[in-house]
Amino acid sequence: QVQLVESGGGLVQAGGSLRLSCAASGRTSSNYMGWFRQAPGKERDFVAAIWWSGGGTYYADSVKGRFTISGDNTKNTVYLQLNSLKPEDTAVYYCAAATRVVILVKTPSSYEYWGQGTQVTVSS
C-alpha cells in the first residue's frame, strides 16, 4: 500500500504561482508519479507525470511551459510548480502513483494509488 498526501493548494490571482507537494509513505515502490486535476462537472484530466527510474517527465499540452513536475526520490516526494496560472486551471489537483513498469502515463486507470486532492483556485 502507498499513501499519498498532497499539500500546497490555495487561492491565487491569475498570473500567479503555486507549488504543490505530494508525499508518499508506506510501500513506496512506485515507478511513476503523476498529477491529475478535476474541475466541477468535468472528468479527471492528466496534468503531468514523472518516471522515477528513467527521469522522464510528461505534460499535458495545456500546461506545457507553465507547469513543472519534479521529485525527490530520497524523500518520496513529488512537486508540481504552477506558474502563469489561469482561471481555467481551477480544479482539485490529485497526486497518483503507479507501480507497473509500463503504463499509459496520461490515463488515470494506470495509477493504483491516489491522494485526497488539494484545491487550486485561480481568480481573474
Image: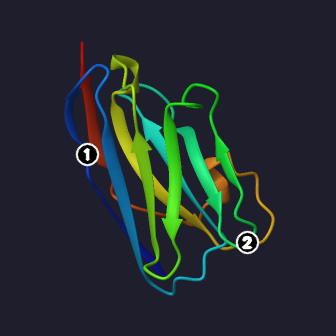
Q: Amino acid at mark 2?
A: Arg
Q: Residue 13's image quarter?
A: top left
Marker disc for residue 9: 1
Residue sitting at x 62%, y 34%: 60
Quick one: label 2 or label 1, which is nearer the N terminus? 1
Name above or below for residue 63 compared with residue 24.
Answer: above
Residue sitting at x 81%, y 64%: 102
Q: Amino acid at mark 1?
A: Gly
Of all residues, the one furthest to the left in this rendering is: 11
Indicate the colouring scheme.
rainbow
Q: Is residue 31 visible?
A: yes
Residue sitting at x 64%, y 53%: 109
Residue 94, x across and y down, in percent:
42, 50
Residue sitting at x 35%, y 59%: 21
Residue 25, x across and y down, in percent:
40, 81
Give the number of the mark in front: 2 or 1: 1
Q: Are marks 2 and 1 in contact (CB under 8 Å)?
A: no
Q: Secondary structure at mark 1?
A: loop
Residue 112, x across and y down, in percent:
58, 66
The front one of 26 and 18 is 18
Q: Secondary structure at mark 2?
A: loop
Left or right position of 49 against 89: right
Name above or below for residue 78 compared with residue 18.
Answer: below
